[in-house]
Amino acid sequence: MRFQKARLIHAEIPLLKIFKTSYGELKTKDFYIIELMNDAGICGYGELEAFPLPDYTEETLETAILIVKQHLLPNLVQKDFAAPEEVHQIFSWVQGNEMAKAAVELAVWDVFAKAEKKSLAKMIGATKKSIAVGVSIGIQDSVDSLVQLVEEYQNEGYERVKIKIEPNKDIAFIKAVREKFPKLSLMADANSAYNREDFTLLKELDQFGLEMIEQPFGVKDFVNHAWLQRQLNTRICLDENIRSLEDVQQAHLLGSCQAINLKLARVGGMVEALKITRYCAENDIIVWCGGMLEAGIGRAHNVALAARAEFNFPGDISASNRYFHEDIIFPEFTLEQGRLNVPDGYGIGVGLNHNVLQKYTKTTEEILLNKGRS
């Protein structure tokens, strides 16, 4: 298979609610859709998930799209591909820039699945027809507003709730939710807001029966996470630390965590994600599919991955209406009794809603992969 051209669609969709973490606030989803067309005219789609600021990882939307245009897409020019895994290999010379790589690689997977007349889920060995999903709630201004929000999402059918925390917005907030919902599957996400000196505070979280505490310490810290895990009854889950299989192996050997939040964009795409998935299953590590406020294309890729048998813990995928008034795909992902259906159409199983996408499109650029840029 050869790729003939790419289209880069820059869009920005307003979020229904401001999403606040210890890093800052997001009011919109600013992203790119990567459309690839092969020599048979089949189009596949990936979504570039890098954030505007380099606070979650080193990548930003601006730097990532530059890598896509100047270094990744030129690697597709005049090459024959027999399988989507080959793209992962030809991108391996590029250090870091996982989100840029993932956006292109996932578009390639979509094209191959469509060409083989399979769903992406089936192509990667997934068997589930629907998946249980959870919801991630940003830092709230008050305990009362948090409890009310949790109640709303529980009434919608979400089976698991993750609450973002930071110092001074942690113990009282988690306690209030646990008292109101004693049986709720509940976890806390610190986004690296704490350090070793906060041990007493983190130890207090043990009393609330949390499923796990996500990323309490820094994004390159495996040693202190291992120290903390030995002190806590609650599982530690790593997120920002994990960029590759090697990171998971290091965390496992050191005892830094008991769970992995696996994000396709953060690990560079499907090939690395599947390696991590298999390793976690072989080593009794909980693996679940995280989210990055994806629009519909990114969400579809996540759903396909989470439909594999290894994913037994509800991920941060959520329905389209969790974040947006309207999504850029059809059909949108809707919650049914706490679950999302796994699309069974070819490729990612959803199409672009061009009317909606056009409303939020900022720029479009087409690149001819057999002749250069137009």
Image (cartoon, grey):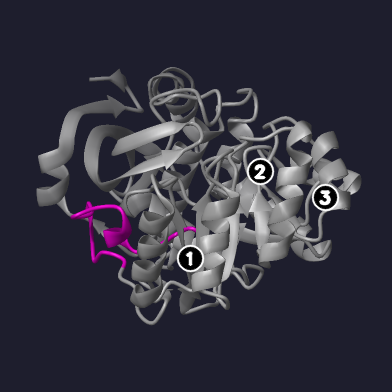
Q: Which label belongs to residue 134?
A: 1
Q: Which residues are the magenta region?
A: 314-333
- Dot 2: what SS? loop
Q: Position of residue 202 (x, y in %)?
A: 72, 47
**Rendered residue at 13%/49% (across/down):** 356
Task: State if disc 2 and disc 3 touch (CB < 8 Å).
Answer: no
Q: Position of residue 240 (x, y in %)?
A: 62, 38
- Dot 3: what SS? helix
Q: Earlier in the sequence, mark 1 or mark 3?
A: 1
Q: Is residue 95 visible to us here?
A: yes
Q: Which label belongs to residue 229?
A: 3
Q: Earlier in the sequence, mark 2 or mark 1?
A: 1
Quarter-wise, where is residue 112 in the image?
Answer: bottom left
Amino acid type assigned to the residue bearing label 1 in the image:
Gly
Reply above or below: 337 against 258.
below
* Category of crowding for the residue at label 1, using alpha-carbon neighbours closer than 10 angstroms: few (below 14), some (14–19), many (at least 20): many
**Rendered residue at 38%/48% (across/down):** 294
